[in-house]
Amino acid sequence: MMGKLRVTTRNFLLLLYICVLMIGFLSCSTIPDGVTAVRPFNKEKYLGKWYEIARLDFKYERGLNNTTAEYSLNPDGTIKVINRGYNPKKGEWKQANGKAKFVGNDNIGMLKVSFFGPFYSGYNVIAIDPDYRYALVAGASLKLLWILSRETRVPDDIKINYLKIAKDCGYKTSDLLWIVHDK
């Protein structure tokens, strides 16, 4: 009996340790310090197709151009995400399907997105025009940033404004890749 009690206690402590680790992972910030998500945010106006105008490069989009993101509402209230890009070296399209959830209230542009099961990353709309035609999106760190548009170009005044916002937040805007849209 004493042996079983020890195993049960050890299992309980192991489970408690795992829970503490999970809470730590789940409570990680989805937005960089000093960066603020848009509020009020209108998810219905945000849905639809967006063209990636510029980005800080990262492994999942490396080498891609003609990149787009399309957002639609899932029946369970989450947002369906379809990211597409063209790899000119391989001559083929690449697509990733995921889902996004609001971190808190759905009138704040702070979401988390997953393309790999239970693993989420920050997706934060930090600037948007009143007509929801142009957006500045931050990831969970200062290494992830996107300028998005409903068209394949942005007006110079929007570009200048979004670059200033990003730079003021601490982003290294000189590292942005400006995306070609020719397909």
Image (spheres, rainbow, N blue to C red):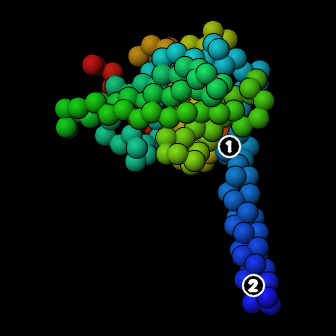
Q: Quadrant of residue 138?
A: top right
Q: Quadrant of residue 129?
A: top right
**What residue is shown at x 76% (from left), y 69% (from top)?**
16
Q: Position of residue 147 (x, y in %)?
A: 52, 28
Closer to us: mark 1 or mark 2? 2
> Helix, strand, or loop for circle 1?
loop
Is 55 displayed left or right of 162 in the figure?
A: left
Is 95 displayed left or right of 6 in the figure?
A: left
Earlier in the chain: of badge 1 and badge 2, it is 2
Q: Is any part of residue 126 visible from this angle? A: no
Q: CA distance from mark 1 to mark 2?
A: 45 Å
Q: Is residue 77 above or below residue 3?
A: above
Q: Position of residue 101 (x, y in %)?
A: 65, 33
Instruction: Please rate how many residues cluster around mark 2, counting C-alpha atoms within 10 Å: few if below 14, some from 14 to 19, many from 20.
Output: few
Q: Which residue is labeled 1 in the image? A: 31
> Helix, strand, or loop for circle 2?
helix
Amino acid type, residue under disc 2 in the picture = Lys
Q: Quadrant of residue 183?
A: top left
Q: Position of residue 64 (x, y in %)?
A: 32, 35
**What residue is shown at x 80% (from left), y 90% (from top)?**
2
Q: Is residue 24 above or below residue 168?
A: below
Amino acid type, residue under disc 1 in the picture = Ile
Q: Which residue is labeled 2 in the image? A: 4
Q: Position of residue 6 (x, y in %)?
A: 77, 86
**What residue is shown at x 78% (from left), y 80% (from top)?**
9
Q: Are marks 1 and 2 in contact (CB under 8 Å)?
A: no
